[in-house]
Image (cartoon, rainbow, N blue to C red):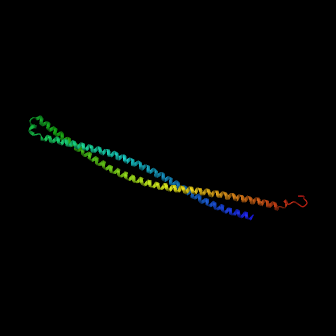
Amino acid sequence: INDRNTKIQELEKEIAAYENTLVEIGTEKKTLESEVQRLDVSRKKLGADIAITENRIESAELTLEDLGGEIVDKEARIAHGRGAVLKSLKGLYVLGEVTLVENLLTSEGLHEAWLEADKLRQLEKALQSEIIVLTETKTALTENVREVEDQRRKLTVLRRDLSGQKSVLDQTRKEQATLLSQTKNKESEYQKLLNEKQQAKLDFEQELRDFETALEFTLDPSTIPSPGSGT
């Protein structure tokens, strides 16, 4: 009986140790689960940030294409305006070459010459004004291009940084998930050991009860046959 009681006490100590270990493992598991969840949220946020950044980069590239097209258009119009101005100046030069005597031959000739010269001067003035406006517009567009290109460069750097951070989080999450899996396996193993020890304790206690019952039966005087009873 003493041996069995001693064995039961040993099992109780082992069971208590396993229960404490399981509590510690359970705490560690909850911590790891919380960390994995936190990492998942951070990874999702970075993924969303990367997607937004990529969309902004694409938008910047489309803006640059539009600005480039507008600059080309303005350059073509400036070139056309300068050609028209040159043509107007040549016309004025030709008129200047006509002698005053030739214009004075008829009053109509002089009048028409003055009208033509005035038209050319007005056209030249209008073309010069348009060229100034187009040149200013082109300058503004070029500045816009520089600003958008700078924004695109910054976004590209941001995307690279975010991708790097996500890679680190992915690796950390993988490591934490591995630890969590190992902890769950350890918890399962200790729970199995605990169940085995608890069952062993129950078996020993049952054996002890059975032994004590048998011993009581053996020592009970009422169970001893009386002399001459024939039994």
Q: Is 103 positioned to the left or the right of 22 in the image?
A: left
Determine the residue positioned at 48% across, 53% down.
Answer: 43
Looking at the image, residue 58 lies above or below residue 184? above
Q: Is 10 positioned to the left or the right of 214 in the image?
A: left
Percent of width and height locating residue 217: 81, 60
Determine the residue positioned at 39% across, 49% down.
Answer: 57
Query: In this view of the protein, can residue 126 be seen by the observer?
Result: no
Percent of width and height locating residue 92: 16, 41
The quadrant of the image that shows the C terminus is: bottom right
Q: Is 66 positioned to the left or the right of 11 in the image?
A: left
Query: In this view of the protein, can residue 86 be seen by the observer?
Result: yes
Determine the residue positioned at 31% across, 50% down.
Answer: 143
Percent of width and height locating residue 176: 53, 56
Q: Quadrant of residue 88?
A: top left
Looking at the image, residue 1 lies above or below residue 76? below
Percent of width and height locating residue 45: 47, 52
Looking at the image, residue 105 lies above or below residue 220? above
